[in-house]
Amino acid sequence: MKSYPNLFSEIGKSQEQIRQRIEADFNTMFFDDQEKIYFEYGEDMAYMMDTGNVDARTEGMSYGMMMAVQMDRQDIFDRLWLFSKTYMYQKDGKYQGYFAWSVSTSGEKNAEGPAPDGEEYYAAALFFASKRWGDKQAPFDYENQAKDILRHCVHQHELVEEGHPMWDPENYLIKFVPETPFSDPSYHLPHFYEIFAQRADEADRDFWKKAAQESRKYILKSCHPVTGMASEYAEFDGTPRMLFGKKGQYYSDSYRVIMNIGLDTAWNGKQDGYAEIANHLQAYFSENTKLGDYHGYLIDGTPILEEAMHSIAIIATNAAGALAADGAYRLQWVEDFWNTPLRKGVRRYYDNCLYFFSLLMLGGQYQMF
């Protein structure tokens, strides 16, 4: 069995302390009546609620499935997957084979189009479920389901009339949405693409290998050379792109980039440029802000008046970046994160999802299956 870096042990936490912390936070997120984001629906389904927007999103559904497979909870995994296939999966039209990115908590679609980060997390979680638990009858034939998702992601323009693939076929970069000629740096998950390169349709495995290589290059281009910040949305050359009337560039989606760098390092070893990005980002926040008191920023670090909506997420992901960092603030972020509780209240969904992934990573418990 592969071993993973355990940074909590480096700050003196025992395996039992780490195990108890992971279990307690998982139970809060999934079962606490006041603070959970997981809700059972009917006899055999469930959804992850974005508590700030009161909907279910492919982002959260696929995150919940990844958490479930990591925690060996096939019951939760299957409930979330069945809800996704029943209410979010598109059976026809130009999005056939994709998933509607947002539905109400009773399953009505709020949008028809997909968000590619959902599809890539679905596929990775399904591949892991296949290895951890074995395949069952459809729709719980996990490996076949994962392969079908990835087939559409790469070949939608060939499979469906008026369809667009989620990855650009020429530069191998994931798009913000299938129709757009630009990206979201936080969508780039080369550590997942390495899995896809082994387990997707054989004809597409070289594509995924190249996607992993190009995404690592793109991450370096999209992160500022001084602050380490990446923009929430960016052109294919990595330069920021402004959307939805936001004044800031380093905003909610952006926080995931350093977390992704940390996990890629934990799974695949050191990658060119990752340590510098992590060091710069940790140094910027350590030297220019007070813990938890954050704003929106331009990627050069210029603060703007927009308040950071997800300060707990910044703490968690900067700590996850310690898996790649080798700078002066590396273990201080791990310590600060350990001493930071889950977020409570209406906006807890996003922060706590990134929090739990970071918790697994830093405890050496975010596994490949």
Image (cartoon, helix red, strand yellow):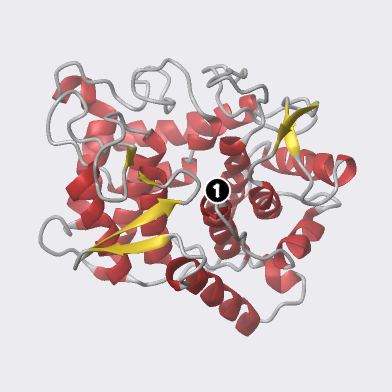
347 displayed left or right of 327 = left
Instruction: Name the residue nearer the viewer: 148 or 38.
Output: 38
Count of marks placed on residues: 1
The amino acid beneath tag 1 is Asp
244 displayed left or right of 158 = right
179 displayed left or right of 332 = left
Residue drawn at (47%, 51%), measured in percent from left and top? 51
Residue 77: image location, x then y, percent: 31, 63
Q: Give the vertical position of 237 relative to 139 (above or below).
A: above
Residue 108: image location, x then y, percent: 24, 41
Residue drawn at (61%, 50%), measured in percent from left and top? 262
Q: Give the vertical position of 253 relative to 2 (above or below).
A: above
Q: In which quarter of the image is residue 359?
A: bottom right
Residue drawn at (67%, 53%), measured in percent from left and top? 312
Instruction: Name the residue nearer the viewer: 300 or 152.
Output: 300
Residue 132: image location, x then y, percent: 31, 68
Q: Give the vertical position of 189 relative to 230 (above or below).
A: below
The residue at which mark 1 appears reads as 264
Name the quadrant of the C terminus: bottom left
Q: Give the vertical position of 300 relative to 23 (above or below).
A: above
Name the quadrant of the N terminus: bottom left
Residue 98: image location, x then y, percent: 24, 35
Other-residue count near label 1 (Cα within 10 Å), few / some / many at <14 / 14–19 / ≥20: many
Instruction: Name the residue nearer the viewer: 332 or 244.
Output: 244
Q: Would residue 256 be seen by someone viewing this image from the given angle?
A: yes
Instruction: Name the residue nearer the viewer: 173 or 178.
Output: 178
Residue drawn at (62%, 59%), measured in percent from left and top? 343
317 displayed left or right of 107 = right
Q: Would residue 369 be seen by someone viewing this image from the given angle?
A: no
Kindly state the secondary structure of the residue where label 1 is placed: helix
Q: Find the residue positioned furthest to the right.
A: 287
